Image: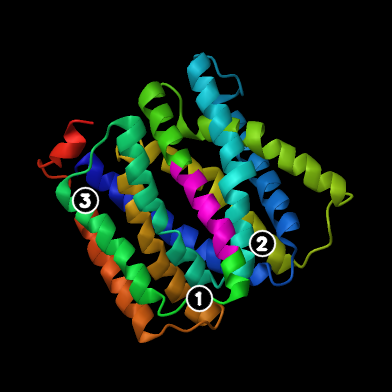
Amino acid sequence: MPPRLVAILQLLLLILSGSLMVVLSKGVLRAVPAHTFYWLQLAVALAALTLYQLVRAGTLRVSQLDARSWAYVAAIGINTFLGWRLLFLIGLYYLPATTHAYLVNFVGIATMVLSVLLLREHPSLWQLVGALVALAGVSVFFRSAPPPGELYGASLLVIGIVLLALNNILVRKLALRVGERVPAAQLTLLTLWLGGLPVIVHGAWTSNGLPALEREHLLVIALYAVVGIAFGQSVYQHLLRTLRSYEAAVFSACGVVFSALFALPILGERLGWHQVGGIALMLVGIVLAQWRGAFRLRIWARA
């Protein structure tokens, strides 16, 4: 099987599991403060990935990174755990799970623009058309402006989307720089230590230790930590050694389909026909966005 097809299938499984985690998290956030939910999942993810690295390699030592690679790791860690993930979580608190997942579709367009400007990776004409078709679904999905309460969450999410697009570029740069010399799980562990540990320390300090939570809530936090952060982020970093950053970002838009389907039985949310139409447009756009082709827009080829 071609490596690129394998990477796409792995990304699909990653998006499927991540969408389920988002919907389950929405239910937990109704009873658990967002700050508590966030620092606990980072603590579990850090512990799980540290244990995995010790069992797998017998050491936490990293000697294959140069100064620039370390700078990328630090930037990714800070941007991920003190930036876009935090804003995404707060946005999820104010927005329905399906709306949250659909707004994240803008990451594909933002990543594509930054890829051209910073990586010189130019999309084909069909990929550009696909991204625009996926984005056009937003106007179909939203027949009117969100209410004021959702506008606040959406504003935070827009900032997070820009930070995530930048993070995709940084991860792609790091992947191209280190290649297969450093395992993706080890890179994720480093970003957790550099960006996640300050959040954990602050959370534990302000919460005066471990808060009392129901067993079901702890289970969701642990699942999100292991599936969505520890190994999910490791798999994503590995996939960007094969896929371009904007290809992965646009493909990730199919998460809204899974989130919508999961939200129906779990959260009791419903989809209108306009939302179904928006999702259909997005799926067409995703298919087109994976077609690299040979043709490039000339104006971008000169960039």
Give the Cα separation between the discs numbered 2 and 1: 18 Å
Residue 159 drawn in magenta: yes
Residue 228 percent across, percent down from the top left: 53, 52
Q: Nearer the viewer, residue 15 or 151?
A: 151
Residue for point 61% across, 24% down: 60
Left or right placement of residue 260 versus residue 197 in this view: left
Residue 230, quarter of picture: top right
Q: Kindly identify the amino acid type of the residue bearing the numbered disc 3.
A: Gln
**Spot occupied by residue 185 in the image (x, y as percentages of width and height):** 50, 35
Tag in front: 1 or 3: 3
Q: Which residue is mark 1?
A: 263
Residue 48 can be seen in this image? yes
In percent of width and height, residue 53 lies at: 58, 31
**Quadrant in the picture for the C terminus:** top left
Q: On the rendered structure, is 147 left or right of 4?
A: right
| Residue type, mark 2 in image | Leu
Image mark for residue 219: 2
Overall secondary structure of the magenta section = helix
Residue identifier under label 3: 127
CA distance separating discs 1 and 3? 29 Å
- Mark 1: which amino acid? Ala
Q: Which residues are magenta?
A: 153-165
Crowd rating for badge 2 (residues with CA inside 10 Å; few <14, some 14–19, many 20+): few
User: Marks 3 and 2, how far apart in space?
Assistant: 39 Å
Residue that lies at the very extreme toward the right in this rendered image: 208
Report crowding for label 3: few under 14, some 14 to 19, many 20 or more residues within 10 A (C-alpha): many
Asked if 72 appears above or below 158 in the picture, the reply is: above
